[in-house]
């Protein structure tokens, strides 16, 4: 069974006025809400090795907690 391929525009043109308005409203809603989300910045790893001088003073877990504190302090709330 062959499936007919039509563009979205062609299908929308066939809708009755009330359904056309629903599609238009929904599309405007999607554009307004889905395209304005800011992207989260990716964490950079340029700091890797920067804490090596503390290797003998602190455990890895201590350093992880401290770097998380520093990270949290830099992010505006």
Image (cartoon, grey):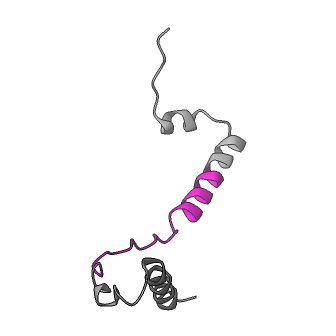
Answer with left or right where residue 18 lies relative to residue 35.
right
Q: Residue 20 at x, y = what percent?
A: 64, 43
Residue at image coords 57%, 64%:
32
The residue lying furthest to the top in this view is: 1
64 or 37: nearer the viewer: 64
Q: Position of residue 51 (x, y in %)?
A: 32, 86
Judge whether 70 appears above or below 22 on screen: below
Position of 54 compared to 4: left or right? left
Question: 38 and 50: which one is in front?
Answer: 50
> x%, y% of residue 47?
30, 82
Which stretch did the figure color magenta? 24-47
The residue sitting at 54% across, 60% down in the picture is: 31
Residue positioned most to the front: 56
Quarter of the image with the C terminus in it: bottom right
Nearest the camera: 55 or 5? 55
Asked if residue 51 lies in the magenta stretch, the reply is no
In this rendering, the answer to whether 50 lies above or below 9 is: below
Where residue 5 sits, quadrant-wise, is top left
For the image, the number of numbered tags is 0
Residue at 49%, 39% in the rendered image: 9
Query: Residue 66, percent across and down?
Result: 47, 87
Name above or below for residue 17 compared with residue 70: above
Residue in the picture at 31% in, 75% down: 45
The reply, left or right, for residue 46 in relation to residue 57 is: left
């Amino acid at each position: 069974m062959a499936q007919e391929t039509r563009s979205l525009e062609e299908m929308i043109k066939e809708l009755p006025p009330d359904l056309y308005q629903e599609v238009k409203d929904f599309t405007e809603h999607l554009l307004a809400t889905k395209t304005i989300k800011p992207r989260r910045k990716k964490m950079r790893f340029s700091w890797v090795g920067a804490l090596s001088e503390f290797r003998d003073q602190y455990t890895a877990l201590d350093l992880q907690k401290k770097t998380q504190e520093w990270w949290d302090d830099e992010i505006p709330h």
